[in-house]
Image: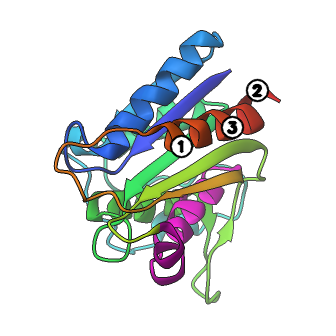
Amino acid sequence: MKILAINGSYRKNSFSDLTLDYIHTISNKNSIDFEILHLRDFKNINFCIKCRKCTQLKSEKRGKCIFNDDMNKIIQKIEKSDGYILISPTNFYTITAIFKRFLERLVVYTNWSFDNKAPDYKLKATKKSICITSSAMPSLIGKTFTTSLKYLKYSSRCMGARIEDTLFFGDKTKKHVQSLNSKEIKMLDKSFKKVFLS
C-alpha cells in the first residue's frame, strides 16, 4: 500500500507537520509506503482560471489542464497512491490559501460541461482517506464555525477516495512551539488503524 499525505501548512514544524511525522512513524512500523508533500515546497502551481477546458470531455479519464506546472508532479503522485491523508490548518475559518489553490486545480477530475451548473466527479470513490485540520478554536466550536473539513472532503472526493475518517484538533495556538499530546496521539493511532490497517 502507498499512502500520500498532502499538507497545506505554511510553516515548518507546525502542528500539521508534526502530525504527519507521527503518521509516517506509524506507517513505517506497519511497512506502509508513506510520502509527504508539503504544498509550500511547490513554487510553480498556477491558480485555476476557470477556463474549464479540462472538464469538457465526458469520460473517466482526467482532463488536461492548460498549465504545465508543478501540479503535474503532484497529480502523478496522486494517481500512484492507494490512500490519502489530507491536512490543512484552519486559517481564518477555512483551509489555507495554498491548499485552496491545490483544490481548485483538482477540477481536472471532474466533468463540467458549460450547460451544467455544477461539476460531476469523474472517479469512483475506490480509495480511502483521512481528512485532518487544526484550529485555535476548541474542537466543538471549530467544527461548527469553520469550513476546513468540508473543503478537505471535496479534495478527497475529487481524487477518487472515500472519506473514512475526519479529525479536528482544537486549541492549537496556546503554545508557540507545537507538540502532540497523548490524547492526540491516541486519536491518530485509532484513526490510522481503522482506515488503513483494518
**Which is nearer the N-term, disc 2 or disc 3?**
3
Q: Position of residue 9 (x, y in %)?
A: 29, 50
Quarter of the image with the C terminus is: top right
- Whichever of labels 2 and 1 marks the residue nearer the N terminus, that label is 1
Q: Residue at x 28, y 65 (%)?
A: 97
| Mark 3 residue element | helix
Work out whether residue 73 can be spotted.
Answer: no
Q: Which mark is residue 197?
A: 2
Disc assigned to residue 183: 1
Residue at point 40% right, 38% down?
A: 180
Q: Position of residue 172 (x, y in %)?
A: 33, 57
Q: Secondary structure at mark 2?
A: helix
Q: Which numbered disc, 1 or 3, marks the residue closer to the eye?
A: 1
- Residue 134: x, y in percent? 41, 58
Q: How many marks?
A: 3
Q: Which residue carries the number 3 mark?
A: 190
Q: Amino acid at mark 2?
A: Leu
Q: The disc labelled 3 sits on which kind of residue?
A: Lys
State the CA–CA distance, disc 2 to disc 3. 10 Å
Residue 67 x/y as whole percent:
31, 53
Tell me the CA gap for discs 2 and 1: 20 Å
In the rendered view, would you say 60 is above or below 191? below
Q: Nearer the viewer, residue 57 or 124?
A: 124
Q: Residues within 10 Å of mark 1 (few under 14, many from 20)?
A: few
Stretch of the chain drawn in magenta: 139-162
Q: Nearer the viewer, residue 77 or 187?
A: 187
